[in-house]
Image (cartoon, helix red, strand yellow):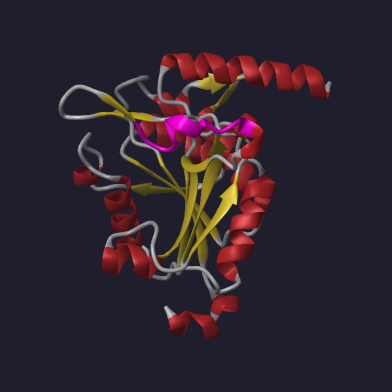
Amino acid sequence: FEKFLFSRKNWHVAGLVLARGGSKGIPLKNLAKIQNETLLGRTLETLTRFGQFNSIWVSTDDHQIARETRRKNVNVHWRESYTSTDQASSVLAVKEFIEKHPRIDVVALVQCTSPFLKVKYLERAYNMIISGQYESVFSLTRQHMLRWKLKLDGNLESDNFDINYRPRRQDWNGELVENGMFYFSHSNLITRLGLLQGGKLGYVEIPAKDSLEIDTELDLMLARFISNIKEVQSG
């Protein structure tokens, strides 16, 4: 990693969206629409407005997704079939992409299932990774949820709090959890270690109102509802 510290001004930073066609929960989820724009289209427009990526790519195995990508003037990477199965991890797909594009120094994996991505969130992550102080930067959101775990004997046990001293929300900083919006990582972290997150970690905290991740039809309905409210409020 240290070898990059002296040449970071010349880094090639690529924005990458993984969008396979075989999603199970919502068929062709990446092409589902919110206010007449696909999830993929919304994300690609945000990446383009950000304006700091040296290149923007969509890694896909689907011709409809490829057409939508080209409609937004974004590069298509045809991913290998072994990266498109239900069992294949995102890291595997990103690694395959980097191996085909070795000039890329930093990859920003952005999920189009986070419909409320904003340019300012990308700016924060980009500035952190390009500073040379971090090897990976990713998005988190803060939750104030009291968790319980089920023990082998069937009994419940408090997991992140003391039942004798239940914290009030205002007295507790909560917990930071991944929201899946984006992961900025040095390419060598992915290709050599198979990790999206490692080394010196940085994070961007995303407000809960923008942290919705679409995985089910209910999530999609909620995203459409929130988007309509945002439009009314801004109009």
Identify the residue at horizontal 64%, vertical 59% (top origin).
Answer: 52
- Residue at the far front: name it: 164
* Residue 113 at least partly seen: no
Task: Pick the residue in front: 78 or 164.
Answer: 164
220 shown above or below 131: above
In this rendering, position of residue 129 left or right of residue 163 = right
Q: Quadrant of residue 116?
A: top right
Residue 192 lies in magenta, yes or no?
no
Identify the residue at horizontal 58%, vertical 69% (top origin).
Answer: 130
Q: Quadrant of the N terminus?
A: bottom left
Q: How many marks?
A: 0
- Residue at the far right: name it: 235
Identify the residue at horizontal 59%, vertical 57% (top origin).
Answer: 125
186 shown above or below 39: below
Task: Pick the residue in front: 167 or 23.
Answer: 167
Picture coordinates of residue 28 (x, y %)?
Answer: 38, 24
Picture coordinates of residue 81 (x, y %)?
Answer: 21, 43
* Residue 52 at least partly seen: yes
Picture coordinates of residue 58 (x, y %)?
Answer: 44, 45
Task: Pick the residue in front: 160 or 107.
Answer: 160
Residues in magenta, as a range: 158-169
163 shown above or below 119: above
Task: Pick the residue in front: 95 or 197.
Answer: 197
Residue 159 lies in magenta, yes or no?
yes
Picture coordinates of residue 99 (x, y %)?
Answer: 30, 63
In this rendering, position of residue 219 left or right of residue 229 = left
Q: Quadrant of the C terminus?
A: top right
Q: Quadrant of residue 194?
A: bottom left
